[in-house]
Amino acid sequence: MESARNIKQVLNLGAGVQSTALYLMSMDGEIEPIDCAIFADVGEEPSSVYDHIEWMKTLGGPEIITVTSGRLGDALQTGTDYKGNKRTDGRHYVSIPAFTIDPQTGHKGMIRRQCTGDFKIKPVEKYIRQTLFKTSAGRPIPKNCHVIQWMGLSYDEPKRVIRVKQRFLAKPKTWSVKFPLFDLEMTRSDCVEYLRKRVPHEVPRSACVFCPFKNDNEWQDLKKNDAQGWARAVEIDKICRTGTGLDSWRFVHRSCEPLDKIDFRSADEKSGQKHLFSGWQDECEGYCGN
């Protein structure tokens, strides 16, 4: 019978706007309760994110568990995957979606992102299998168990919802996914408004300090207000262009220029004129910014 099953409701906690809203709404009884929230720490978040998580832990809500696959920047520096494995062809492995430019042709591209899967998804799922359900490594969770993972994707992110649903179609029936914000038709702006009344500080955007999906305003803010984070971003940007077998130069900024050489002022600021629709329109498609 369904009532005899061991069911766990788990929030993938990115510690950004949407997942923080979900955590607080569940804690306050506005939506279903969760058993725990799991934060996958890549070791490269700005200090404001870690401070925010510590504040959340003081609220007395569901347990917040931190898991990790190690420090992402260290893997980038050694040119390995999250397990420490090097590429068989001897090239320097880069898992972040760095921007690339061919020095011969000038053609620009982008590396396929693997950091979200390796450093966010895998450690969370490993904890669910091995700790929540006491399952041996490499084994599926028992058939009488069921995990429901909550994702903080909002109503203005339908494409991301579809992609995650497609990923879960390949999972056993003991795994399922839920999108409470999407179901409630809550947008990111709705979450910001909700948090404004609930949180005594501005909830930070969760993303690595060197995440290539940052817009210029975010890069400028990092440089101005987080000296340690900025130094780390510059360091990783330079690391992206090290190693053997480079067929293209790699950068964390979309301009394909060294991060510490870029003027992050907008076109408006540089020209003194107001332009409509200026700025970066994309954002990370993983769970980093939730």
Image (spheres, rainbow, N blue to C red):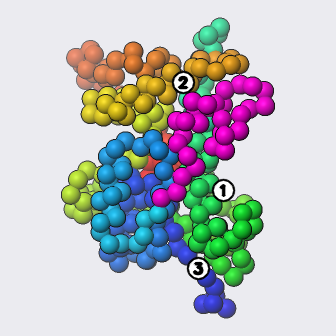
Distance from the alpha carbon under mark 1 to that under mark 3: 20 Å
Residue at 35% over, 72% down:
61
Q: Left or right: 5 with respect to 156?
A: right
Q: Which residues are magenta?
A: 66-94
Question: Can you give x and y, in whole percent of width and height, for residue 110 in the image?
Answer: 59, 28
Q: Helix, strand, or loop for circle 3?
A: strand
Residue furthest to the top in view is 104
Question: Can you give x and y, in whole percent of width and height, for residue 134 in the image?
Answer: 65, 73
Q: Helix, strand, or loop for circle 1?
A: helix
Q: Given the image, on which type of amino acid does mark 3 rest?
A: Ile
Please identify the quarter of the rendering in which residue 169 is found: bottom right
Query: Mark 2 against mark 1, which lies toward the viewer?
Result: 2
Residue 260 among magenta residues: no
Image height check: is 104 above or below 259? above
Q: Which residue is mark 3?
A: 7
Distance from the alpha carbon under mark 2 to that under mark 1: 31 Å
Q: Left or right: 244 with respect to 282?
A: right
Q: Which residue is mark 2?
A: 239
Is the C-beta separation of discs 2 and 1 under 8 Å? no
